[in-house]
Image (cartoon, grey):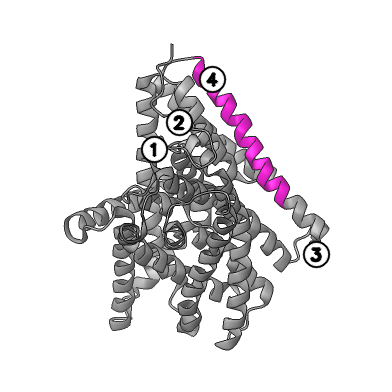
């Protein structure tokens, strides 16, 4: 199949499955696509069991293997999806909860990585699966960051207080970049990929983390500001949309070449363009076209990504040897998420007031998605790839379907909004922030 054939099939299936969901299941679009794709995959597997002579599953699997899921997600869709999410973020609300966001996106990810890794290591031993501690940490690192694509999709249909929404969205955008950096470090340690092919020392780890994370942020800031200056010099929405496209793809491609964090780079660039850029470099007409364009891109790529997540079961396969470990991994990941959220909020709660019920919403709303699956699929072939891939897929499917569908009910049950989450009300001991609105003044 050519690239055009693959795109045609994926877009056609997304449209057909989306139509079925709209008329019959009436689930949120992303969740509906995963459910229908899983059902279709299950039907193919069942058909193969009943009539093995047709080998339909083998043919479909052969075609799906031509799609490099890791490349599609990490080197294709992710840059556009992160930018589309970041461009709609209100930086004033992010700034008001910057401490919580930064702690959850850094300390939280590290805490979760080691909690998940440690528990999975002992549980794997308990159920008779050999999984070295460092490979358990590799799993912990790829499953700990919440998926911004899944999280932002849920936030579109669940009403939460503005500052809590900022925490959820901001953390998911930044912890994705941090999570990829931690995964890179853990995988390098597991495979002996340190300097000159030797083992990684503490200095190697620290250097890699600083270069990847802060290098990505700096690249996004520089390229985002350059795009801002170009957009400020004209008032032509088609050209300005092209500038944002070039910014996203160019920034991400250069970040990959420089071995710094592409996700962090495009998030920083997106926040800059969505706030400073929309206020000072776009007319009202341009602003509407730019935001509508990125919203459309977000919806289309989301549909294809969640469709692929559902179909990937045919590639991964069903291995009942890892059934119990997969089942146990779900509460382990949720427990680690609860601790990773509770510790930063507990520390900051000494001087800041948080929405009652925020910990439960942040825990249950920490969805995993395509990024975790892509990272698991990128693991080198070996004895530990199969168990990690299987339990990753189990956690992701549970996260998207069960957590995603119950999120709205949870919010209604536990959220009681205090004054600090009402727009325009200051937090205790803080000055009132002036919001930067995407619908700012007209450009001269």
The quadrant holding residue 203 is bottom right
Q: CA distance from mark 4 to mark 3?
A: 45 Å
Q: Which residue is mark 1?
A: 423
Q: Residue furthest front?
A: 429
Q: Are marks 2 and 1 in contact (CB under 8 Å)?
A: yes
- The part of the chain drawn in magenta is 209-233
Q: Are marks 1 and 3 in contact (CB under 8 Å)?
A: no
Circle 2 Cα neighbour tier, 10 Å, few/some/many (<14 / 14–19 / ≥20): some
Quarter the N terminus occupies: bottom left
Q: Earlier in the sequence, mark 3 or mark 2?
A: 3
Q: Which residue is mark 3?
A: 199
- Residue at figure coordinates x 60%, y 30% from the top left: 223
The relative height of residue 385 versus residue 245 in the rendered view (above or below) is: below
The quadrant holding residue 381 is bottom right
Q: Are marks 3 and 2 in contact (CB under 8 Å)?
A: no
Judge by depth and name the residue closer to the eye, 243 or 7.
243
**Residue 395: percent from left, percent from top:** 46, 69
Q: Which residue is mark 4?
A: 230
Q: Which residue is mark 2?
A: 435
Q: CA distance from mark 1 to mark 3?
A: 51 Å
Q: CA distance from mark 2 to mark 1?
A: 9 Å
């Amino acid at each position: 199949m050519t690239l055009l054939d693959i795109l045609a099939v994926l877009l056609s299936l997304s449209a057909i499955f989306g139509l079925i969901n709209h008329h019959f299941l009436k689930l949120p679009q992303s969740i509906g696509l995963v459910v229908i794709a899983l059902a279709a995959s299950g039907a193919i597997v069942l058909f193969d069991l009943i009539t093995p002579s047709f080998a339909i599953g083998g043919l479909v699997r052969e075609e799906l293997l031509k799609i490099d899921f890791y490349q599609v997600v990490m080197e294709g869709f992710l840059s556009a999806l992160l930018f589309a999410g970041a461009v709609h973020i209100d930086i004033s609300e992010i700034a008001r909860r910057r401490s919580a966001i930064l702690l959850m996106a850094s300390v939280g990810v590290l805490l979760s990585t080691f909690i998940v890794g440690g528990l999975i290591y002992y549980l794997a031993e308990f159920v008779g699966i050999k999984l070295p501690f460092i490979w358990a940490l590799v799993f912990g690192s790829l499953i700990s960051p919440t998926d911004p694509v899944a999280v932002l999709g849920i936030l579109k249909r669940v009403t939460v207080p503005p500052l809590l929404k900022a925490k959820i969205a901001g953390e998911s955008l930044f912890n994705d970049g941090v999570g990829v950096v931690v995964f890179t470090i853990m995988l390098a340690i597991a495979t002996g990929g340190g300097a000159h092919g030797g083992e990684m020392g503490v200095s190697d780890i620290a250097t890699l983390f600083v270069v990847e994370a802060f290098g990505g942020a700096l690249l996004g800031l520089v390229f985002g500001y350059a795009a801002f200056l170009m957009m400020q010099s004209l008032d032509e929405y088609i050209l300005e949309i092209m500038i944002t496209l070039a910014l996203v793809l160019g920034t991400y491609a250069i970040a990959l070449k420089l071995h710094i964090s592409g996700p962090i780079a495009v998030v920083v660039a997106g926040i800059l363009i969505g706030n400073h850029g929309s206020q000072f470099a776009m007319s009202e007409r341009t602003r509407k076209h730019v935001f509508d364009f990125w919203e459309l891109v977000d919806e289309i790529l989301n549909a294809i990504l969640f469709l692929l997540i559902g179909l990937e079961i045919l590639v991964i396969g069903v291995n009942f040897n890892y059934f119990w470990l997969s089942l146990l991994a779900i509460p382990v990941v949720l427990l680690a998420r609860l601790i990773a959220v509770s510790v930063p909020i507990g520390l900051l709660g000494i001087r800041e007031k948080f929405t009652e019920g925020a910990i439960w919403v942040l825990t249950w709303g920490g969805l995993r998605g395509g990024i975790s699956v892509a990272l698991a699929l990128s693991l080198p072939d070996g004895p530990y790839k199969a168990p990690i891939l299987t339990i990753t897929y189990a956690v992701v499917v549970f996260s998207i379907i069960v957590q995603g569908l119950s999120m709205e009910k949870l919010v209604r049950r536990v959220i009681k909004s205090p004054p600090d989450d009402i727009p325009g009300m200051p937090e205790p001991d803080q000055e009132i922030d002036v919001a930067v609105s995407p619908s700012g003044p007209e450009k001269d």
